[in-house]
Image: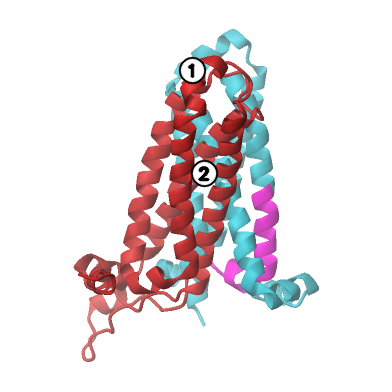
Chain colours: A red, B cyan
Amino acid sequence: MDIEALLKTLEASGLATKIRDSLFLFPLIESTHVIGLALVFGTIAIIDLRLLGIASTQRSFERMASDIFKWTWAAFALTALTGSLMFITNAPVYYHNLFFRTKMLLLALTGINMLFLELTARRTIHGWDQAPSAPRTGKAVAVLSLAMWIGIICMGRLIGFTTSRAAAAPPPPAGVNFDDFLQGAPNDPPK
Amino acid sequence: MKQFAAWLSTTSLSVYIQHHNSWVIPAIQSIHIIGIGVVLGSVFMICLRILGSAGMDQTLRQTTSRFSPWLTSGLCLMLVTGVLMVIGEPVRELITFSFWLKMFLVAVSTLIAAIFQVNLRKQERRWEEILVKRRSIRGLAVLTFVIWLCIIILGRLIAYDHVWGSWSPATKA
């Protein structure tokens, strides 16, 4: 199956249709996405500032990592899930959007960046765990991480300004029933 | 309020933002979201410390003094960017139910945080561990976090105020 067909299948799926046709599902999914990304960014920034020696300099890095990373991953899972749900409602449009693509690229790069930290500075953790800041590689990873996450947030917001919201299914032509009032979200681009 | 919004939209700063809206508004909104990350992250860490799930190698006071400056600066950043968004799009922001409910919750959570800070400063150090074991304090910590989640949801709902139906002034002609 080629990618265009897959995108069309996703868009036509029952779940995507349900989200599109609901008045409040998309806004609630989007809000949950903001909550998730705020926690991802907030917790990662705490770790990055520790690596740079700007904040929490008195604490053991390992101790902080074990306190914080589980929450970062949980929040990331929530953000990825809600992001996927938004994606399927208008899959072909998002897929071809430049800001969406840049965001996905940056996400992949933050993953590589994190892996790099694991393979370099984290290997010598016993040497700097109690030190106020990480070795140079750790600091470089932290700067890149902060810059890329800020970039991801900006790209995410720009996606909302450069794609129009998927149209809900047109209401049934004849007769008025209660469902008509629950369905049919306006098609204004969300800002 | 409609007259105020209409007047605000004629001010020179508002006109400037409206004329450059293709990049100014996304930029302001992105900075606002970064502020949300800083604030929610800080509230979350203080909340986890009170519940005893993170930062247990630090006292409660050490934890609050680690995060309070970030919390305050994050709030200031959101206040500035929030005011700019209102000036840039007064009708979209002010003529909504979500905006005013959000402002009410911001006032409530700021009040709780201020009372908490003042009380924590008054307590002797040895009282701290007794304090965090109190059910009311733990409940208050969870409540504050939940209020912040509601503030974030309401912030996003400003763009979708029609979800409130007849409660939304935006749906009235």
Up-down relation of residue B41 to residue A130 (above or below): below
Q: Which mark is residue B56?
A: 1
Q: Which of A119 and A110 is in front in this view?
A: A119
Q: Is residue A4 magenta?
A: no
The residue wearing badge 2 is A41
Q: In this view, which residue lies farthest toward the bottom?
A: A174
Count how many numbered circles sit on residues in the image: 2
Mark 2 surroundings within 10 Å by alpha-carbon count, few (fewer than 14), some (14 through 19), many (20 or more):
many
User: Is disc 1 placed on a helix, strand or loop?
Assistant: loop
Residue at horizontal 25 percent and vertical 68 percent from the top = A10
Q: Which amino acid does label 1 sit on?
A: Met
Magenta stretch, main secondary structure class: helix
Q: Which of marks 1 and 2 is in front?
A: 2
Up-down relation of residue A80 to residue A96 (above or below): above
Q: How far apart are marks 1 and 2 (CA)?
A: 22 Å
Give percent across and percent down for residue A117: 49, 33
Q: Which chain carries label 2?
A: A
